[in-house]
């Protein structure tokens, strides 16, 4: 009788474990879907350029506040999140630690505002090419998207000269 009870307990325990994995699978997958990225693109630059930038719209569809805290690409030595401000009559780029994206809200990374800055290019993405950009979120983790390389403003945002501060 004792052997029968141990077997039943073991079968029951394994069943619970399998059920937990089956039920948790979709929830874990939804975490990766919590950040909806659209309209992503990377600025095409001349072959001698050492920098470029990525832009996109990010919608936080999760049930919690989150933040874009970094990004990774294979073709740059350094990747940072930047924003732009007016200083002494000129627009200036500067590094930020994060872009907050409250639950249910949208963050727009666009020229003249927040963007993913890629520096020390080891290869220069060309117009029409598609490149992978891995976004790093505080809660959602890493999300990789494909971004089209296309033409955009070349250091001129909203008709104003840009300068970089690194």
Image (cartoon, rainbow, N blue to C red):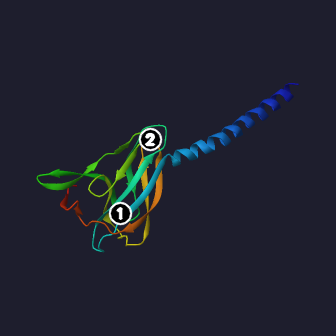
Q: In the image as oriented, which residue stretches furthest toward the front? A: 158
Q: Which mark is residue 76?
A: 1
26 horizontally vs 57: left or right: right
Residue 157 lies in quadrant: bottom left
Query: From the viewer's perspective, is residue 63 above or below residue 47?
Result: above
Name above or below for residue 116 compared with residue 97: below
Q: Earlier in the sequence, mark 2 or mark 1?
A: 1
Image position of 112 with respect to 121: above or below: above
Q: Position of residue 133 (x, y in %)?
A: 42, 59
Q: How many labels were placed on the picture? A: 2
Q: Which residue is mark 2?
A: 104
- Is 84 left, or right, of 15 in this rendering? left
Give the Cα distance between marks 2 and 1.
32 Å
Question: From the image, which quarter does the C terminus lie in?
Answer: bottom left
Frontmost residue, 140 versus 8:
140
Q: Residue at x 29, y 58 (%)?
A: 111
């Amino acid at each position: 009788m004792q052997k029968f009870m141990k077997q039943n307990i073991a079968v029951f325990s394994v069943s619970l474990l399998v059920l937990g994995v089956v039920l948790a699978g979709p929830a874990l997958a939804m975490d990766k879907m919590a950040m909806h990225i659209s309209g992503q693109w990377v600025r095409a630059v001349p072959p001698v350029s050492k920098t470029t930038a990525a832009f996109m719209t990010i919608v936080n569809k999760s049930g919690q506040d989150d933040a874009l805290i970094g990004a990774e690409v294979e073709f740059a030595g350094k990747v940072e999140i930047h924003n732009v401000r007016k200083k002494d009559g000129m627009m200036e780029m500067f590094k930020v630690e994060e872009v907050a994206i409250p639950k249910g809200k949208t963050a727009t990374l666009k020229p003249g505002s927040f963007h993913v800055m890629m520096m020390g290019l080891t290869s220069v993405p060309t117009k029409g090419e598609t490149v992978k950009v891995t976004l790093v979120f505080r809660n959602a983790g890493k999300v990789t998207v494909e971004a089209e390389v296309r033409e955009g403003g070349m250091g001129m945002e909203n008709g104003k000269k840009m300068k970089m501060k690194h």
